[in-house]
Image (cartoon, grey):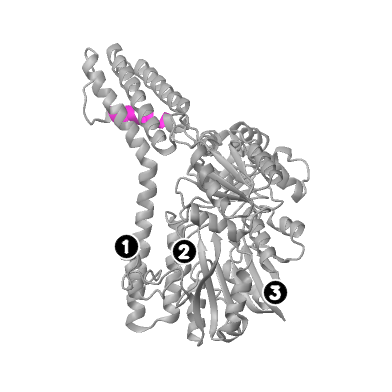
Amino acid sequence: MKDLSVIIVNYNVSYFLEQCLLSVRKAVRGLQVEVFVVDNNSVDGSVEMVQRRFPEVILLANKENLGFSKANNQAIRQAQGKYVLLLNPDTVVEEDTFCKCFRFMEEHPKTGALGVKMMDGAGLFLPESKRGLPTPWVAFSKVFGLAAMFPTSSVFNRYHLGHLHPDQVHKIDILAGAFMFMRAQALEKVGLLDEDFFMYGEDIDLSYRIKEGGYDVVYFPETRIIHYKGESTRKTSVNYVFMFYRAMMVFAEKHFSGRQARLYSFLIRLAIYLRAAIAILVRAFQRVTPLLLDGLCLAIGAVVGEKVVPDPLPLGITPMWGAYLAVWLGSAFFSGAYDKPGRLYRLVSGMLWGSILLMAFSSIVSIVGETNKKHLLVAVLVGLVGMTLWRLIWHFRSYGHWRFGEPKAKRIAVVGSSREVKRASVLLRQAGAQKPLTHLEPQHTPADLRQIKEVIEIYKINELIFCGKDLAVSQIIEWMVQIHNSAVEFKILPENSTYIIGSSSKNARGDYYALHIEVNLLNPYHRRNKVVLNSLVSAVLLMLSPFLIWRIKGKRQFLKNCLGNLVGLYQWVGLKATATPESKPAILSPVDKVSNRRISPAAARQMEVVYAKDYTPYTDLVILARNLSNLGRSI
């Protein structure tokens, strides 16, 4: 029997997984440990990375995404450890984490499950390290913000047990699924993870069953881990809201009964609709705000024009001015003025094209006279000045400089040996990032922290990179906690890795530096043009259908395809060999560019990669022209 079985479920986060496994490799020393990685059909090279870099790992490569519970259960059924650890791939463990947890469990045989102190990528404590049972009152307090208003209250914040000191050992109710150190004997008694939970809620359910089985669930802060993606990562996602609260309903239906179950169900349903509505409103507001500000600037421009131009257009909330604003803002939208990163030339281009369209329309229909054109010209010029000013001010407040479109300038320092510092500099250059301003080679004495703080102050450092080959994870975490500077972001360069990984807070997704490859098909500008092209092509094909339909195989399906593309349900040309569940169904694929040849699956995937990388609307038109007779193909 092994001392410990570590189980990591991975899905498309090879860069995090690599760093996690490197930390696990150091933490297993002194114990008999087996490590499982269950990959849920990742497409980012995770399987190949594990096979190449971690031959000691037991790899289970699934052909589909089974979800968190099923994937963990796969490995648990094969595990030989006295203890089982469920570990997220976006974590980094200290070198003594496993030994300390093992020792505590050995000394406390009534403990069935244990969690540790979790820190985010900025070195801040994650409150979800210790949680209470989500009873109706606890759920109510969390959903309606009482827990956030009274974070240390034993009455209002029992979800995160805010009244319990984060540096003391406590018996608690619920552990976070990111780190669950469990006694195999307890799992045999209470059962494995409930596979009715696909992604969220399974940790709550399993913790609850372990307590019901007569074991203690313990929060153990004497060792720490970094967990890059905290619980707030996707709170503005409607999908997250529905999945999380649906999991809570599964839990309630399973463990509560009678009036308590009905009350809980009501609260959860209320939470679903409330949080979903908030998420939708927040996202809509974020997207609409730039348009509203630009519309306001154009309206101010119209007012100014009315004062300075003889015989101006009448002002007011009228269909005429509504049409003018719609043309200007629509042209700006399709020119990419609202895409990130922002570019002023896109805004100018959009306003220019919008003005050309309005002037051309005015001349053709002879409705607007020469003076009115001057009014429109003044409106767009003044509006353009206002639109530029608010963008520059917003950018300065966000990034501290006036170079619109450029992110906040990185002032980077690297802590590590000269060899690792050089490697970090090469990776930063390959990723297109700024080179380090300075570096510091640690002497592994108390003076290191003081020198790091001095470097941050003297060079105004806002990003600190730690070299994992030269520093212990425990030392890195301690420095992150001690520095505690909100203006400084931390990243780690793992040993022999090509990624530099970090996260600015629990509310931000983990990010990383790597060699940047531009994929045109993911660019918002090209994606938007692709949607417009699909609709325009469909409209043209429908108009020409009386002449074309005799050449097309599958005439009824052809009309269905045209209508589907017209309303955005399908796409004429898209990915098939590399499609994801989120991809729209495609009639044709890049393979159809050489339709007379038989293509192997590997070659088809390669062609689709090239298509995505170099995509232009012209590519779609070429494929469509070569396959007119196949436009009635079934999806």
Give how far across and how far down residue 462 sits, in percent.
50, 42
Give how far across and how far down residue 417 sits, in percent.
68, 47
Q: Over which residues does the magenta segment extend?
A: 321-331
Q: Which circle, 2 or 1, is nearer the viewer?
A: 1
* Tag shown at residue 145: 1
Displayed quadrant of residue 418: top right
Q: Is 408 placed above or below 477 here? A: above
Q: Please name the residue shown 32% across and 32% down the image.
A: 295
Q: Please name the residue shown 61% across and 42% down the image.
A: 439
Q: Earlier in the sequence, mark 3 or mark 1?
A: 3
Q: Which residue is mark 2?
A: 243
- Amino acid type of the residue tagged 3 in the rendering: Leu
Q: Which residue is mark 3?
A: 31
Label 2's element? helix
* Tag shown at residue 623: none
Label 3's element? loop
